[in-house]
């Protein structure tokens, strides 16, 4: 059977900005697949190409074996797309929006009515169905948007940052919803820059950075692959580079320590990869003391997806976000992305 | 939910996607038009303003030229009688010119993505829905103007005359709506679209026969006005208003390049609508990158 989504060597530039350099991924039918990456990594661009909103410069895209480039109409039928920004018509009621959506997907009338009722119920929107959606809270709007995306029973539901900006309650409602539709056999492809979200939700994840897939697998596979435990160490709140370098050379020689990375974006803190179940923590502390270096803070943890990202790129997701935030022209992109 | 849905689920999945393209086109067009009418119904002030404005034109323009020498606009024709056709066409034109604005706002708010990711039978359904909406509004406005003109003493055309007037308004609205939507898909934002509407609207009015007959104009303007599609909508309607007897062979306009008959004017309008629709095809087709 063809995979639910197959993307091969996707490329898309906006002028001189290479939004997507080389993205290949394969989403199997029935799984929740997460696309994790910092701001500006190319997640939205990838999804827009998949959903036929943007024409890729190169690459192949298939939805259940149907080429989205050669046969966009059929691909559109198989996809449900919930965009990063909620797009509803404030003047319409929730039910009217779903009725419009049903007609755009050519659902037969009787079927549409039944389906709309059940989607309203599934997303606990019955009480609001006949109120103008302009009066909805953020969480309600998102739920309506989800209902619209799923209304025509797509093979694959594509969600761009479905929980961004939602409160904790709404967020976990979305998670429950996604698990529920997965249980009913719908394939889910979502993007996120929340590590926990992907960790909790996704069966498999592709980590994407600067337009490229840098790692792909199940979350535990990826974490195992990076191996070792993590120690985050701060010599001082803001350590000078020379001091961090000195600490690194001291610590690198310890038998329990596999790798030391200096994180310049976090005040030259040190990220250590150490053998699990070793007494690395105390060994590190002793070595620092012997070298006459202070310890501002130290903590040991199992590797996270962030460590996967760190190992591949030399920076953490958060740092990447901060760096990206300063280089983006949000307004310009919004304009260009608006169709 | 799974229990209630599974039976119909299979039936839907088996449906051929291109089973009935025309039926699908009608379905999506109807739904898109319905949205526009719901919006209008919930914002009735737009409709009220749209009816009051042309009526005020009618009264004000009529009053403005009340003391013009008798016979200036033709034998036994008051300016009030003369101007009705101009206002009908100008009003329909203005409405259609604005048709792109809601689409532009949909683009800016991301709502258009909802339409573009859907397996529409044709994106012309977006054009068709807007055209149906604007045409309905224009016909309501036209009816108001016709009734008001009758009260002001301009008389009332017969049924065939009204039918031809309706046809003319529909053709004009279709062509201009298509162009406006083409702009809405092409221009960067609503500011630019409003600017284009602004610089198009009044100049096209003044460079047409809406306010004065062709014979009043200097030569160059006569040329411009007789190449302006608006004149081809105005002159036939005016002729119907001013003559009991008319046919497709009636000469409705003395253009610098020759006589234009009623039939020729209608042909020009049909051509205008078709060319507009063809012109925007690439914009609609293109994956909007
Ligand atoms: N329409 C556009 N015009 C110009 N540049 C664009 C456009 N859309 C995206 N970009 C650029 O392409 C890159 C990838 O953007 P994209 O929106 O795909 O990232 P993302 O991973 O979705 O980020 P975020 O997490 O902020 O949503 C960014 O550098 C962005 O500035
Ligand atoms: Mg994005």
Image (cartoon, coloured by chain):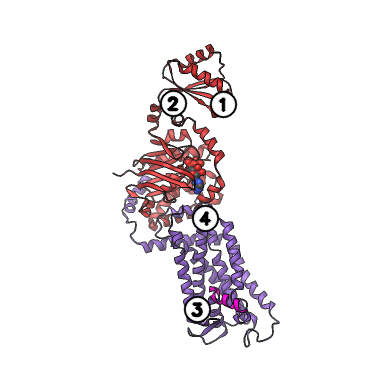
Q: Which mark is residue B265?
A: 3
> Is B184 or B23 nearer to us in this picture?
B184
Query: Picture quarter containing residue B151?
Result: bottom right
Is residue B172 rendered to the left or right of residue B14? right
Residue A202: percent from left, percent from top: 40, 36
| Picture colour for chain B | purple
List the residue tagged with mark 2. Answer: A303
Note whether residue A153 is visible: no
The secondary element bearing badge 1 is classed as: loop
Q: Where does residue B70 sit, x and y in percent of width and height?
A: 67, 86
Please provide the residue range marked out in magenta.
Answer: B218-230
Q: Position of residue B153 (x, y in %)?
A: 63, 82
| Badge number at residue B106 | 4
Q: Residues within 10 Å of mark 4 (few under 14, many from 20)?
A: many
Give the residue displayed 44% in from the left and 48% down from the top.
Answer: A48
Disc number for residue A267: 1
Q: Residue furthest left?
A: A1
Q: Which is in the foreground here, disc 3 or disc 2?
A: 3
Kindly tell me whether mark 3's CB lies below 8 Å from ligand 1: no
Residue B125 appears in the picture as rendered? yes
What's the colour of chain A in the image?
Answer: red
């Amino acid at each position: 059977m063809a995979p639910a989504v197959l993307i091969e060597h996707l490329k898309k530039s906006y002028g001189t900005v290479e939004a997507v350099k080389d993205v290949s991924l394969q989403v199997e039918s029935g799984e929740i697949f997460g696309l994790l990456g910092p701001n500006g990594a190319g997640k939205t661009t990838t999804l827009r190409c998949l959903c036929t909103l943007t024409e890729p410069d190169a690459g192949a895209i298939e939805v259940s074996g149907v080429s989205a480039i050669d046969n966009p109409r059929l691909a559109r039928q198989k996809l449900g797309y919930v965009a990063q920004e909620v797009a509803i018509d404030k003047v319409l009621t929730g039910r009217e929006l779903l009725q419009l959506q049903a007609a755009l997907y050519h659902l037969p009338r009787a079927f549409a009515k039944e389906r709309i009722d059940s989607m309203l119920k599934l997303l606990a929107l019955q009480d609001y169905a006949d109120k103008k959606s302009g009066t909805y809270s953020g969480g309600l709007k998102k739920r309506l948007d989800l209902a619209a995306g799923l209304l025509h029973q797509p093979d694959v539901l594509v969600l761009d940052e479905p929980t961004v900006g939602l409160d904790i309650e709404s967020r976990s409602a979305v998670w429950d919803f996604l698990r529920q539709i997965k249980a009913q056999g719908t394939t889910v492809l979502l993007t996120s820059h929340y590590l926990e979200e992907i960790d909790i939700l996704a069966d498999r994840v592709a980590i994407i950075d600067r337009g490229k897939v840098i790692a792909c697998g199940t979350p535990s596979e990826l974490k195992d692959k990076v191996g070792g435990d993590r120690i985050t160490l701060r010599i001082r709140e803001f350590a000078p580079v020379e001091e961090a370098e000195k600490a690194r050379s001291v610590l690198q020689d310890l038998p329990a320590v596999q790798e030391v990375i200096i994180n310049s974006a976090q005040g030259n803190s040190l990220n250590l990869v150490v053998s699990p179940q070793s007494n690395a923590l105390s060994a590190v502390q002793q070595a620092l003391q012997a070298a006459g270096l202070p310890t501002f803070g130290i903590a040991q943890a199992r590797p996270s997806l962030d460590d996967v990202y760190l190992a591949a790129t030399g920076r953490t997701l958060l740092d990447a976000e901060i760096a990206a935030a300063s280089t983006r022209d949000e307004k310009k992109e919004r304009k260009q992305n608006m169709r | 939910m799974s229990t209630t849905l599974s039976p119909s689920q299979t039936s839907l999945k088996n449906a051929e996607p291109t089973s009935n393209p025309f039926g699908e086109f009608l379905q999506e067009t109807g739904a898109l038009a319905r949205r526009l009418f719901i919006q209008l119904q919930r914002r009735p002030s737009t409709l009220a303003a749209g009816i009051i404005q042309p009526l005020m034109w009618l009264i004000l323009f009529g009053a403005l030229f009340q003391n013009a020498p008798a016979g200036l606009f033709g034998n036994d024709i008051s300016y009030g009688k003369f101007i009705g056709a101009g206002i009908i066409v100008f009003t329909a034109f203005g409405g259609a010119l604005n048709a792109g604005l809601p689409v532009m706002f949909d683009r800016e708010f991301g709502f258009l993505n909802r339409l573009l990711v859907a397996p529409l039978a044709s994106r012309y359904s977006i054009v068709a829905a807007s055209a149906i909406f604007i045409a309905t509004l224009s016909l309501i406005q036209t009816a108001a103007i016709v009734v008001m003109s009758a009260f002001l003493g301009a008389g009332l055309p017969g049924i065939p005359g009204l039918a031809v007037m309706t046809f003319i308004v529909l053709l004009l609205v279709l062509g201009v709506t298509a162009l406006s939507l083409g702009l809405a898909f092409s221009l960067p934002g609503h500011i630019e679209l409003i600017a284009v509407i602004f610089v198009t609207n009044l100049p096209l009015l003044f460079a047409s026969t809406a306010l004065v007959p062709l014979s009043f104009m200097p030569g160059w303007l006569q040329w411009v006005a007789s190449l302006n599609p608006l004149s081809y909508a105005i002159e036939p309607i005016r002729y119907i208003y001013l003559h009991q007897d008319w046919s497709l062979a009636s000469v409705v306009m003395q253009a610098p390049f020759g006589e234009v008959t009623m039939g020729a004017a209608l042909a020009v309008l049909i051509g205008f609508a078709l060319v507009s629709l063809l012109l925007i095809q690439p914009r609609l087709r293109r994956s909007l990158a």
